[in-house]
Image: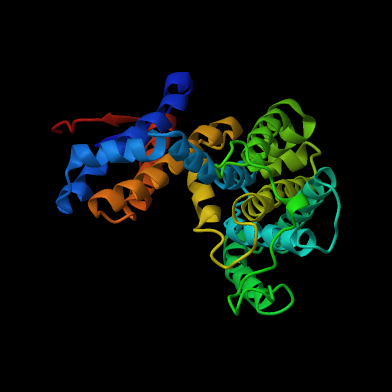
Amino acid sequence: MIRFEPRTNPGPVLTYGVPVIAAAIAILLAAIPLALADAPIIKAYGLMITGAYGSVFSISEMLTRATPLILTGLAAAIAFRAKLWNIGAEGQLYMGAMAAVAIGSGAIDGPSWVMIPIIMIAGAVAGALMLIGPTLMKTRLGVDEVVTTLLLNFIVLLFVQMMLEGALKDPMSMGWPQSEPIIDSAVFPPLLERMRVHLGLIIALISAIALAIFVKRTVWGFEIRAVGENAAAARFAGISVTKTMILVAALSGGLAGLAGVAEVAGTRGYLATDLSPGYGYAGIVVAMLARLSPVGVIASALFVASVFVGADSMSRAIGVSSYLADLIVAMALLCVLIGGFLTRFTVHFDRKTAG
């Protein structure tokens, strides 16, 4: 007979060690599909490491990939902490990118110290508005936000496609559906010469630290944690659950919108429908791997970005599908969920006695 008992105090080793162990197990399990693909396993792992960390260019590409993952990971982390299940970060990312392009492609002109903050604010507001609506539907009408935020992703993508064929279309794109480019003064400057890593990385790191301080050290952060733990008890204690959820929605959607701004202003320079390879969904994995810790999101995003960049490099070198990266990330999430359960509960195997 199997019996589960709650742990009274898991301790820091279990709390912080589980994600690390889960990531390691997921990477080890990747040997199974590699073997099935008849790939040299040791060589494949070596190519993954060198592909992500073998040169300054590789590290730059990994950090570039990690930038939107940090921001979407933070968006998921703050929302999930309040039990607001935001599955719409992908749509919020695209709305933020579209707002940045609408303003930053020439609607307003000015120096960089004016343009960059403006497009950041525009993108954050656009992303926030995308989540505030479903949040009000949840708190006022009891509508499941998982459904509304998920479906909004597809609606937003269709809206972006329409805008790229219409008002935002670049007349110089020779028919290709993309927006006009961001003007030079609104482009995020690179952090390294001739590399793609850009100012967005600094913004993402500052956002993670600021969010950690906000959650742990402010009254609003305490209210968010209280609502996430028990909304009924928080309401009984005098906390406005609706206002707290709206605040969470603004923070979560705003961070996802900033991810879109970082992509168009830092990496692409313009908006297209293939701007994101799924950063909004990957952010959920990042947040879960980090156990909803804002600082932990940084390490989690670096791990996921390393897997993606390393797997891309490996697939080109030995002909193995780059979808192996998605498999590793999915297995890491599964291992974290299992590890999280074992962190909260102890497992006892009781022998049946003959009666």
Of residue 25 and residue 162, the one placed in the foreground of this image is 162
Of residue 352 and residue 153, the one placed in the foreground of this image is 153
Q: Residue at x 68, y 33 (%)?
A: 206
On-image quarter of the N terminus? top left
Q: Residue at x 48, y 23 (%)?
A: 8
Residue 83 is left or right of residue 329, and the answer is right
The colour scheme of the drawn protein is: rainbow
Viewer can see residue 30:
yes
The quadrant holding residue 161 is bottom right
Q: Residue furthest front?
A: 194
The quadrant holding residue 272 is bottom right
Question: Residue 320, image x and y in percent?
Answer: 25, 54
Vertical placement of residue 24 versus 178, above or below: above
Of residue 92 and residue 99, the one placed in the foreground of this image is 99
Marks counted in the figure total 0
Residue 109 is left or right of residue 272, and the answer is right
Viewer can see residue 246:
no
Of residue 257 and residue 7, the one placed in the foreground of this image is 257
Vertical placement of residue 73 versus 122, above or below: above
Question: Residue 331, image x and y in percent?
Answer: 34, 46
Q: Residue at x 64, y 54 (%)?
A: 260
Question: Residue 160, image x and y in percent?
Answer: 65, 71
Question: Residue 193, image x and y in percent?
Answer: 59, 38
Q: Residue at x 77, y 58 (%)?
A: 104
On-image quarter of the C terminus? top left
